[in-house]
Structure formats: structure tokens, C-alpha cells
């Protein structure tokens, strides 16, 4: 993403000189000789850096600084001052300016200051992007002992040099977001931002603002211009979880970004150019959604350059034991307990269970078992009663239940246990409320 600089100085020759010099350094620099015009530019766009002279017509540099900190607090400000106005420069620093230079200034010194600020801004953007890791290290790892998961990792390894968009499908909790991170951190974009958003958790208006940002005054409460995730993820990767929940008009805007590499902020009139790799995921039948007019077919094919279907945990039993041991070691330190192992009988219960909530549910079960266990090993007594009932059910010819039927029965028992509170039941199962609703609705 280009480093955007606005230069405001009452001397037009100085403005022209600085715009040319800073543009040659790879920045996107524009200038004006009027403080009010500079304010209008800031109201209509986002700048990384403002270089402002203290004395200007329209607005002084100090007045402009005050307005910038209201409208765009993330914008750095460098004040230009004469030798006789050092006191004003100090006041500007107290109000939030990051630097000041005195006239006549040394151009090389100013360029050096700008380069340092640009480097710092790059680190800030990267830190913002890294918030999605929730403390995870860049060295993302995954436990994959089963053949299906090893084949998926082989596929990811085979496309590490590719820039293609990827579409993950699979039930809630199978590990789609983790695999998206692995795709990013084994790709050529691994040093660039990785951001993620769940399209099912926000209203259409909030999702539009989060993805594409908004201009000041675009809607009630938009008191300043905001960059969206698509803009912040420039040169990196954006993971769109539960993409099938996205509203049709937002799907159209996303398609434009993929096809043309540009978009408009909400309320904006100027296109913003970006280079983003998209990884999408859903737990729904996308082709069914397309046939029902809920999902754009053209967007599906733009995202689905490579589709990777992740099987549910019940279809990769070999992963249950190593995952259970991993979650034991993950959650044990905060429990202050000295549990050393998972008893084989308990492991047998886990392996026989269907896990409607997949890996996420397994983690919740192990964390709960750690809290309940009173011995040095995890025993069946610390596992949910419904799992043990499931294990000892007698299989009789003609009365074999489908996985969907068992999932629905178990979900109904959990909902009943929580007094018909579906939100708490979904949280306990490690699935979304929408997924729980679908399981209960299945005939």
C-alpha cells in the first residue's frame, strides 16, 4: 500500500519541491498552499502523514493539527516552522505532532524523517493485522495424523507458490480458519497482513463498514473516515469465514474487488486500488445457495479457484487421540492440576463419539474434563454423560440411526439441559447458534 502524504505550505514552490522529492522516494504525495483546502482533502481521504506549515491562509498549521486529530487520529503530523516560532512547534508536539522541522530545512533530513515514519506506519499496520492471531505465533501448526488431513496439507504444500483464491468447505469447527492461516503463512505473502472476519456475526451495514471502510458522514455516527479490512489487508490475505451469509449487494462489491482490484469506501466517490488474496469458507451447501439465488455464481467461481473440502472429525478418527492430548497440554497450565494422561477408557469414549461440534467441541470437552477431574488422569467420569450414553447405545438391525439423527438427538438434550437457552447450548457445543438451529431443524 502506497504511503500517502499531504503537504500544506503557503509557499507554492516549497509544496511543488516537496511533492516531487517525496514522490521520487515511492510515496504518493499531494500538496496545497491553503489550510482550508488541506482540511477538505483530509475530510475526503485518509493520509498517513501530514506535513504542515504553521503559517498558512485559511487555517494555521496548529488549527489544522487540531482538526486532523479529531477527524483522522491515526494520521501522523509533522509541523514546519521558522526559527522564530519554536515555541509554537513545541505546542504542536504537545497536541500530537510527531516531529517538527525548521525553515530553511535540509531536504535529505526531512526525507529521512519521513522514511522513519513510513517504516513505523508499516509496523503499525502489521500489528493491526496480527490482532486476528489472538496471541498465536506466526509458526502456525496443525495436528493431522489421519489420511484425509494429510492429503489436505499436501494440497496446501503444492499451492504455496500460487496466488489463487481458495474456498474451504466443511462443518462448523473442523478447522477452516486454522487451515486458512497455514495457507497464508506458507505462501509468498507470509510477511504481509493476514486478517479474518466472520460474515455471519455482523449486520449487513456493519459488515460493509468493516470490509470496505467508510467516509466521514457516510451514515449517522461516522464521525471520521475509517479504513476497512480490504484496505488494511492490501498485499496480504483476507479470510472471509461463513461467506455464504454475506448479503447479495456486498457480494457484488466483493466481486468487483476480486475482478478489478478496486473498491469504494461506504459513502466514497474515489476508487481505492488494492492487491488482496481472498480465502473464503462456509459450512453451507454453496451450490444449493446458488440455485436458491442466495449466493452469486460468478463470485463463487472467482473465489473457488481451488476448493478444499475438510471432513468432519467423525470421519477422521485417527486425529481424535492426538488432538485430545494436545488440548490437554494446552489447557492444563491454567488449571493448576497435575493431570498426566487421558485414560484409555476415556479415549475409547471420545473415539466412539460423533462430535457434531467437531474439533472445537473436542477442545471444549477436554477443557471441561480438566476442571472436573479429581485424579491424575482424565477418566470417563469427567466426560459429558451424553457421550457415555451415546457409546453404550445398542446397535440393532433395522434400528440403526443416521449421524444426522444422533446429532439432532444430542443437540436436543443439550438444549434441554440449558433450559431451552439455545445460545448457551450452542456455546457449550462449540458451534454457532445458526448451526445449532440447522441441526435441530433437520428432518
Image (tube, rainbow, N blue to C red):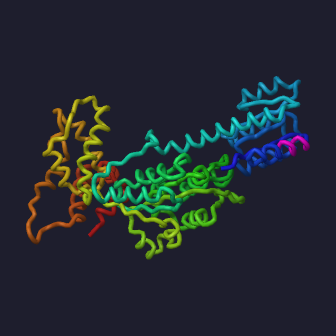
Q: As rendered, which of 377 and 71 lies closer to the eye?
A: 377
Q: Identify the residue shown where x is 53% and y is 68%.
A: 302
| Secondary structure predominantly adopted by residues drawn in magenta | helix
Residue 278: horizontal and vertical position, in percent? 52, 58
At 82% from the left and 45% from the top, the residue drawn is: 19
Q: Is residue 345 above or below residue 440?
A: above
**Residue at position x 52%, y 48% from top?**
190
Whether residue 350 sits left or right of residue 177 in the image: it is left
Taking 85 as reference, is 136 left or right? left
Left-right relation of 271 to 13: left
Where does the image place residue 211, in percent across and percent down from the top left?
57, 55
Query: Magenta part of the protein: which range?
Result: 12-18
Q: Nearer the viewer, residue 257 or 426?
A: 257
Question: Residue 213: x and y, percent?
Answer: 61, 53
Q: Quadrant of the C terminus?
A: bottom left
Q: Nearer the viewer, residue 326 or 90?
A: 326
Q: In the orientation shown, which residue stands out farthest toward the bottom? A: 291
Query: Where is residue 200, by image quadrant?
Result: bottom left
- Counting from the top left corner in percent of width and height, residue 171 is at 34, 60
Q: Is residue 419 above or below residue 96?
A: below
Amino acid at each position: 500500500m502506497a504511503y500517502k502524504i499531504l503537504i500544506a505550505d503557503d509557499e507554492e514552490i516549497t509544496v511543488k519541491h516537496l511533492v516531487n522529492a517525496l514522490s521520487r522516494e515511492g510515496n504518493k504525495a499531494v500538496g496545497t498552499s491553503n489550510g482550508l483546502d488541506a482540511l477538505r482533502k483530509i475530510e475526503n481521504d485518509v493520509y498517513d502523514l501530514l506535513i504542515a506549515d504553521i503559517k498558512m491562509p485559511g487555517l494555521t498549521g496548529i488549527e489544522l493539527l487540531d482538526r486532523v486529530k479529531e477527524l483522522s487520529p491515526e494520521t501522523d503530523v509533522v509541523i514546519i516552522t521558522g526559527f522564530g516560532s519554536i515555541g509554537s512547534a513545541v505546542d504542536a508536539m504537545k497536541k500530537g505532532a510527531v516531529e517538527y522541522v525548521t525553515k530553511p530545512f535540509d531536504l535529505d533530513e526531512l526525507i529521512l524523517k519521513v522514511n522513519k515514519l513510513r517504516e513505523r506506519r508499516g509496523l503499525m499496520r502489521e500489528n493491526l493485522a496480527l490482532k486476528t492471531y489472538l496471541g498465536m505465533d506466526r509458526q502456525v501448526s496443525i495436528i493431522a495424523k489421519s489420511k484425509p488431513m494429510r492429503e489436505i496439507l499436501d494440497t496446501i504444500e503444492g499451492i504455496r507458490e500460487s496466488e489463487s483464491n481458495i474456498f474451504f468447505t466443511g462443518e462448523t469447527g473442523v478447522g477452516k480458519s486454522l487451515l486458512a492461516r497455514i495457507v497464508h503463512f506458507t505462501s509468498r505473502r507470509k510477511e504481509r497482513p493476514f486478517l479474518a472476519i466472520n460474515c455471519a456475526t455482523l449486520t449487513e451495514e456493519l459488515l460493509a463498514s468493516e470490509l470496505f471502510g467508510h467516509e466521514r458522514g457516510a451514515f449517522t455516527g461516522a464521525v471520521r473516515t475509517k479504513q476497512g479490512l480490504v484496505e488494511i489487508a492490501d498485499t496480504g490475505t483476507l479470510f472471509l469465514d461463513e461467506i455464504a451469509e454475506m448479503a447479495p449487494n456486498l457480494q457484488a462489491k466483493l466481486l468487483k474487488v476480486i475482478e478489478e482490484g478496486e473498491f469504494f469506501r461506504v459513502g466514497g466517490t474515489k476508487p481505492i486500488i488494492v492487491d488482496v488474496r481472498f480465502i473464503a469458507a462456509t459450512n453451507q451447501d454453496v451450490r444449493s445457495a446458488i440455485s436458491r439465488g442466495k449466493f452469486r455464481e460468478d463470485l463463487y467461481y472467482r473465489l473457488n479457484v481451488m476448493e478444499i473440502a475438510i471432513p468432519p472429525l467423525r470421519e477422521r478418527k485417527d486425529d481424535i487421540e492426538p488432538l485430545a492430548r494436545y488440548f490437554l497440554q494446552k489447557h492444563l497450565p491454567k488449571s493448576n492440576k497435575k493431570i498426566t494422561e487421558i485414560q484409555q477408557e476415556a479415549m475409547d469414549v471420545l473415539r466412539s463419539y460423533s462430535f457434531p461440534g467437531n474439533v472445537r467441541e473436542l477442545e471444549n470437552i477436554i477443557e471441561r474434563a480438566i476442571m472436573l477431574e479429581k485424579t491424575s488422569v482424565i477418566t470417563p467420569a469427567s466426560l459429558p454423560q451424553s457421550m457415555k450414553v451415546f457409546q453404550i447405545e445398542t446397535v440393532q438391525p433395522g434400528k440403526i440411526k443416521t449421524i444426522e439423527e444422533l446429532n439432532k438427538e444430542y443437540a436436543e438434550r443439550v438444549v434441554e439441559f440449558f433450559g431451552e437457552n439455545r445460545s448457551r447450548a450452542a456455546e457449550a457445543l462449540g458451534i454457532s447458534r445458526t448451526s445449532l438451529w440447522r441441526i435441530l431443524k433437520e428432518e
